[in-house]
Amino acid sequence: MSEVTAREIAEVLLGLRKKLIKIVAIIASVWAISFTFVTDAIINKIKTDLLPKGAHIIYQYPLEPLILKLKISLYLGIAVALPYIVKVVYETLKSRTDLLNNLEFSKSKLIAYFVIATVLFCLGVSYGYFIMLPIFMNFLYQLAVQQGALAYYSIAEFVTFVFLMLVIFGFVFEMPLILYILVSNNIVKYSTLKFYRRHFYVAFFVIGAVITPPDVFTQLMVAVPMIAFFEVSIISIRIVLGKRVYEDMHSASG
């Protein structure tokens, strides 16, 4: 029995090793391509579109531009590899644990979820880039001017902050899909989401405080959209899964 167990463990580790090598290869390939051909254009685009008029970009140390390019290229590599990483994690948990027993996805459903997730993420990034960040960056610039300060932004901190905010908005827009998958597969009950609504609100403000600079306005910029999309998720789930939601709420109240 122990011999079989050891063999199974070796097979699992070998399979994970091959998948990890594939993940690293994807990230490294995208990193090299984006570092050579893409990253400079992205940085220049962000500076052109989002740097407030009157503000200036500076380099604080000689290696800052190089390190920034390396970071942005790495982020792009991870983003491209993320669907495969999710697939590997799902297959591993599904085959080796009981955590995802309720999840059964057909190939067509997986494709549909992938397309919807991509569209929602792009919508979130577009919302942040074209609507929220221009208003937000100009607000912060005007606030600095009113206080008599000159706006000289570190290129690394400026671009990294923009990337962070765009990723946040992208994932916030994913919330309706994530909660729908959890509720429709009986992993989380609709009544549980309703019951712990206030707890989610507190968690959103904690997340906003952790991932943003220590000022209330920036934290609100993160927490309020998360709350809004949580409410949109609740309403959407109630509409799409009407009968199941009614039975769940009825059993919870009874």
Image (spheres, grey):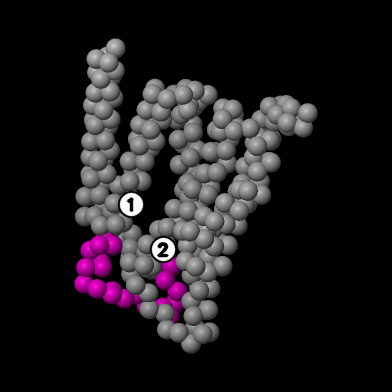
- Which is nearer the eye, 237 or 190? 190
Quadrant assignment for the C terminus: top right
The question of residue 90 being in magenta is answered with: no
**Res 234 seen here:** no
Q: Amino acid at mark 2?
A: Phe
- In this rendering, the answer to whether 234 lies above or below 87 is below
Q: Residue at x 56, y 67 (%)?
A: 216
- In this rendering, the answer to whether 235 lies above or below 240 is below
Mark number, residue 75: 1
Measure the alpha-carbon separation of dots 1 and 2. 13 Å
Q: According to the image, label 2 marks what residue? A: 161
Q: Position of residue 203 (x, y in %)?
A: 57, 51
Q: Quadrant of residue 46?
A: bottom left
For disc 2, the neighbor class at 10 Å (few under 14, some 14 to 19, many from 20) is some
Q: Amino acid at mark 1?
A: Tyr
Q: Earlier in the sequence, mark 1 or mark 2?
A: 1
SS for callout 1: helix
Seen in the image, is 247 located left or right of residue 97?
Answer: right
For disc 1, the neighbor class at 10 Å (few under 14, some 14 to 19, many from 20) is some
Q: Residue at x 38, y 78 (%)?
A: 152
- In this rendering, the answer to whether 15 lies above or below 60 is above
SS for callout 2: helix
Q: Residue at x 61, y 48 (%)?
A: 200
The question of residue 60 being in magenta is answered with: yes
Q: Position of residue 59 (x, y in %)?
A: 28, 74
Q: Position of residue 239 (x, y in %)?
A: 69, 35
Quadrant assignment for the N terminus: top left
Q: Which residues are magenta?
A: 49-69
Extreme residue in the top direction:
1
Q: Position of residue 235 (x, y in %)?
A: 68, 41
